[in-house]
Amino acid sequence: MSLEFAERMRRIPQYPAAETYEYGGELVKLASNETAWSPHPAVMEAIERQLQDLNRYPDPDRSVLRQRLAERLETTPARIAVGNGSCDILLAAGEVLLEPGAEIVYAWPSFSMYPHLAATSGARAVTVPLDSDARHDLEAMAREVTAATRIVLVCNPNNPTATALPIGEIDAFVGSLPRHACVILDEAYVEFSTLQDPGESLALVERHPNLVILRTFSKVYGLCGLRVGYALCAEDFRSAVDRVRQPFAVNSLAQAAAAEALLHQDEVARRVERVAVERLHLDGELASRGLETSDSEANFCWVSLGDRDEAAILRGLAERGVIVRGGADLGEEGYLRVTYGTRPENDRFLEALDEVLAQVPAGA
Ligand SMILES: Cc1ncc(COP(=O)(O)O)c(C=O)c1O
C-alpha cells in the first residue's frame, strides 16, 4: 500500500535543483548566486565561540541579531522577523495570508519559490509577464490586484533576470495599491544594485504599513550554508509569521554569524565592488561573443542563447566542470543564468562556453 498524500502535494512544484555535481573534478559553481568568498574571519570566530553551546537550544527570540538589525535599520526589534533563510519567512507569509479563494500576484519569470505559495495554500496565482527589458511591469501588475489579492510579490533585483527598478517606482506602486494587499519586496540582491542605496527602501516600510521587505544573509554576506534571512515589516506581520513557525527555526550558529557579519560593512562594500568589476568583465566578454545579457543589477547575469539548444549547452558546460542554470527550469527557455564568480572562475566559464558554442551553434 502506498501513502496517501494531501491533495495539495500534486500542486507543489519541484524546486529546480542545479545540475548535480556528479561530473567530479574541480567544479566552477556559478549556479546558485552564491558569494565566491568565505565568511569574514571574525564571523568564523563567532561561529567557533558558539560551537561550545550547541547542547542548548538557540534563542527563540533571536534577540541579539534582531537588536543589531534594528540598530542598523533604525527601527525596533518588534518590526524584524528572522527566519531560517528568507524563504522561511516567504513560505510563512503564504501560510498566514493565503487560503482558497485568495489571490497572489507576481511577475514571471521570477524567483522559483514563488509558485509554492499558491500551491501550498490553494490560493490562485496570477502571474504577470516581465516587460520587454525583462523588468517587472508594475502597471500590468497593479491591474491584476483585486479585492481577493492578499500578496503581491516584487523581486528587486529580479531573479532570474537580474534586472531592477528604481525604488521610487516601487514606492509609487505600493502607494497605488489597496492596503489589504500585502506587498512583499524581495531584496535578496539589493546590495548589488547600482540603482539605489540599500538604505533607501527602508523608509518605505514607514510609509506603507502593508509592505514587507525581505532580505537575506545568503548572498552578499556569504552565509547561505547556515540559512538566515529577515523581514522588515509591521509588528502584526512579524507576530503572525512567528506563530506559524517552530520556535527554534533559526539555529544558534546562524544567529551568531549573522549578528557578527553585520558589523563588517567594509567587507560587504568590498564584495559589492568585486562583483561590479566581474559584472563588467563577464558581460563585456559575452557581448563580444554576440551574446546578449539583460542589464544586471545583481551578482549574476541572464544570458540570451537565441535559438541555440539550451540543454545541450548546459550539458556541455557541466561536462567541463562548469555548473550554471538553464532558463527552462527558471521560467523561460533559451537562457543561462550565470553567477559572477572570481576572475579565474569566470574565465573558466568563458573558455568552456567557447568550446561548447563551437559544437552547439546558433540556427542548428
Ligand atoms: C530572489 C530571492 N529571494 C530569496 C532567496 C532565498 O534566500 P534564502 O537563502 O535567504 O532563503 C533567493 C535565493 O536564491 C532569491 O534568489
Image (cartoon, rainbow, N blue to C red):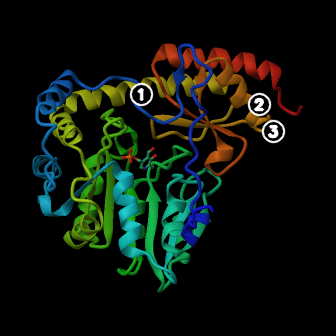
- Residue type at tag 2: Ala
Dots 2, 3 in contact, CB < 8 A:
no
SS at mark 2 in the image = helix
- Residue type at tag 3: Asp
Which disc, if any, is residue 142? none
Dots 1, 2 in contact, CB < 8 A:
no
Q: Residue at x 16, y 47 (%)?
A: 58
Q: Nearer the viewer, mark 1 or mark 2?
A: 2
Q: Nearer the viewer, mark 2 or mark 3?
A: 2
The part of the image, by quadrant, that contains residue 267 is top left
Which residue is tagged 3?
307
- Residue type at tag 1: Val
Considering only vertical position in the picture, is 317 above or below 293?
A: above
Q: Residue at x 14, y 56 (%)?
A: 61
Tag 1 or tag 3, which sits nearer the N-term? 1
| x and y, in percent, of residue 208 in the image | 29, 71
Gap between marks 1 and 2, in whole Å? 28 Å
SS at mark 1 in the image = helix
Q: From this viewpoint, which residue is outermost toward the front?
A: 1
Tag 2 or tag 1, which sits nearer the N-term? 1
